[in-house]
Amino acid sequence: MLKKIGVLFILATLLLTACQNGNKADDTSAAPAGSSASAQPVAANGSTVLDLKKKYGSEKAKAIMPMYNVPYDKVFKFKFNSKLSDLSPSDIISVHTDIKALEASKILTSASFDDYLADQTTIEVKPLGGVLVSSDTKKGLQTGWGNAPIYYIRINYDLDAATPTELDKPIIIPFTVKSDLPVPTVKKEISPDGRLKLVWNEVEGAKEYRIYQSARYTLLETTNKPLLGAEEGYAGHFPLLQATVTETNFDDFMDGAEGSLTVVKSDDPSLYDLVSQQNATVNGEYYVTAVGADGKESNFSAALSTTKLSKSLPLELENDSRISLSTFPSVADLPKTVKVKFIDGSIAERAVEYHTDGIQAAESGSTAINYTVKGTALRGYLMVEKATQQELDGLAASSVADPTNGYVEPSNDTDYVPAPDIPTIIDGQAETSSGDSSSSGSDDLVDRQKSNTEQQVESGDQEPIVVPTTLADMKVAADSAAEEYLALSMIGGQEEISLKAFPELQNFDTLSDTLLKVSYQNPLVLGLKQYKYNYRTLKLTVKYDYSKEDIAKKQQEIIAEAGKIVTGIIKPDMSDDDKRLAIYDYLNDNTKYDDEALENAEENDFKEIDPKFNDSFNTYGIMVNKVGVCASYAASYKMLSDLAGLDSIVVTGTMNGVPHAWNKVKLSTGWVNVDPTNNETNSGIPYLLYNSSDMTAADDDYALDNDYWTDSEIPQFASTDDSQDYYVKNGLEVQTVAELTDKLSSNLKGGTWTTVVRFVGVKDENALREGVGTTIAEVARDRLEKTKMGSIGTYVVIISE
């Protein structure tokens, strides 16, 4: 019956994403578990970094700067000012491959007492078998610390105390093993059609690069199981050489199949080649090394894990969705979506687009029609037994452009592993300063670095705090002195930021982790474009889309408009639930998604955007201009919530495999998901994700990443309760077509011409079309020809005009 409906599924694929994504890891300096970023009154102008530390009670925190480029078999000696011989050396000091330095990441070492002075203790720590060793590397199965990109020493007892004193918070000291060549910094690129490429910086002196893989395959199964990586000490990892290349990128995971595509050529030039697979054999983790003309090889790069990327990497169509060469009775019977299998075996629906340019309807026999699957490289052609030229033209015209590609994310240009010429003892004085690396193998290295740290921190603590004038009546979101320091600096548009006072920020993982958290949770950080840490000078260089003056001007406009909005929509007698709804509804009623900005980013392959669209990618876009992409929606929602006294955070991840940002808000029952971007105005679905659990979000192909917060504390934001979800609370969930048609019939009889429900069971499209068509014919036949039906994920919309 529903074949008579004029336009079918016109709402599919309107979901709006386009947000930023980043790489980061854990921050040992973050707030204790169970907390969320506190809104802090800012420090006063004229105060120093030391004053800021006193505010957080961290002015006496113990720290030792990283020790980079030590010998591969370095033996560390730690001198304690107390007698610790009653304790086990391994309980005092341990070595890890993850910055959280938990038990699981501990690696095998020899920790022993070196001498027994009356009131002092010296502990010697040395490697017992390398980490990430591989017989395929130039060094082979050598002894020493191994090939991990970075290690972390954990000290549990106070080095200076006269009596054994366990620290409230352990000292974590990063160190790296000196590499024969600079270590490549590897990043991912995922194309708009979901193909993975490894990319890395050019290494001076390298003639070629080697790609290694470590994976867990399961026979006859499609899986991409997580490996025991840095958080587990790389247990059982033995990376194998997969390829050697001279370029600084790699996508030939199938060894000869360009872009890792499985292609069957078509004999007819008007018909598409069949692409039945992509990302085949992509699995596990990848490492890259640089090899010089003399045959020497660098240490391994940081691992690029594909497990975390699985939801963005399609593999093939699920068995019952393999439509290539299939024959369908008519154009109306063509599937609007297909099930796509991803490299981890998970399944998700993706829209099908039909391409009829150059295709003529057959006068007799079947007509071949080309198709592609949105967000994938999968394509081919199928057959339709009966099709008119008008139907073919209408089929192509009914396809809706889908803004399903990522945001131009800020670029982290920091080397993950410092270059071999970075000194072990860094004085941070000048770009050309050599520091002290001549005796990195000496026994007193730790003592000298401890003394150097004290000098650098003392100097850094005296540096003044500059508070942006726009923050006079505002607060920053921060849980530590380091976070507030970065927040104030970036809100003020500072381009050079000294990190002398914060040894914990002087490594790639903690710095990028903290910086991303601060930038996401502070809506007045505008136009963050690029950042790079200089290991030699201890300074962070930041680039923005705007000048410092323009940043301040835009912030003033944002603050003024946000205050005006909150004053207008938030009333004294409102409950917190009413306030949250008022903010969501305001954004729905007064703003819209900036399709032009996204199209521009697509045209530039998401590497840059035309400056005229910069506003749409930060708070200014939605708050002031009333147009923006999801990063702007999420930041604006958080700022309005902050001003209304509500707990909310920005969260990041993917939707339909595409980078996306949305929010979590705290109810009395816990944290829940709210997506202000995909509201009724932008998606056609009212309250598509509103007060929803993580499971409900996952059902609609939302997937959280760890970019918005420090990894160890993300569990506090778990959303497990659906009782306040809009569709649950309003009885708009259905499990069967019969339940849907009952609601549709009731609405039509009552004069309600739009029905929106969420399916929580298996959605049979054929049964759905038949059931809806029959119901409309029985209850409101005069509206049958004008009825439109759309499907987005688990949602179904029926509009009977």
Image: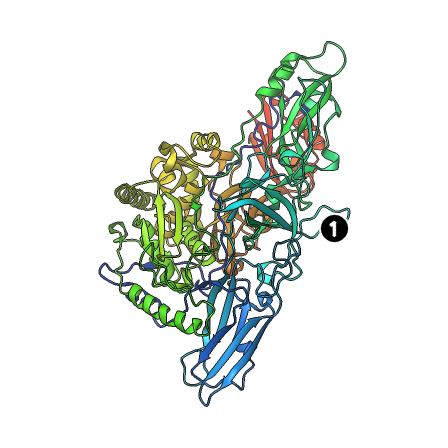
Residue 789 location, x and y as percent?
A: 60, 29
Quarter where residue 558 is shown? top left
Q: Residue flagged by tag 1: what amino acid is it?
A: Thr
Quadrant including the N terminus: top right
Residue 732 location, x and y as percent?
A: 59, 42
Q: Is residue 39 visible?
A: no
Front position in the image: 564 or 488: 488
Front position in the image: 211 or 144: 144
Residue that badge 1 annotates: 218
**Count of numbered marks:** 1
- Residue at the far top in the pictured view: 363
Q: Is residue 131 above or below residue 729?
A: below
Front position in the image: 59 or 244: 244
Front position in the image: 484 or 529: 529
Q: Is residue 538 above or below residue 702?
A: below
Quadrant including the C terminus: top right
- Residue at the far bottom in the pictured view: 118
Q: Is residue 617 visible?
A: yes
> Of helix, strand and loop, which one carries label 1?
loop
Q: Is residue 602 left or right of residue 792?
A: left
Q: Is residue 430 left or right of residue 262?
A: left
Picture residue at 26% right of the left edge, 65% below the top: 462
Residue 261 location, x and y as percent?
A: 66, 34
Quarter where residue 591 is shown? top left
Residue 717 location, x and y as percent?
A: 51, 57
Picture residue at 69% right of the left edge, 45% below the top: 345
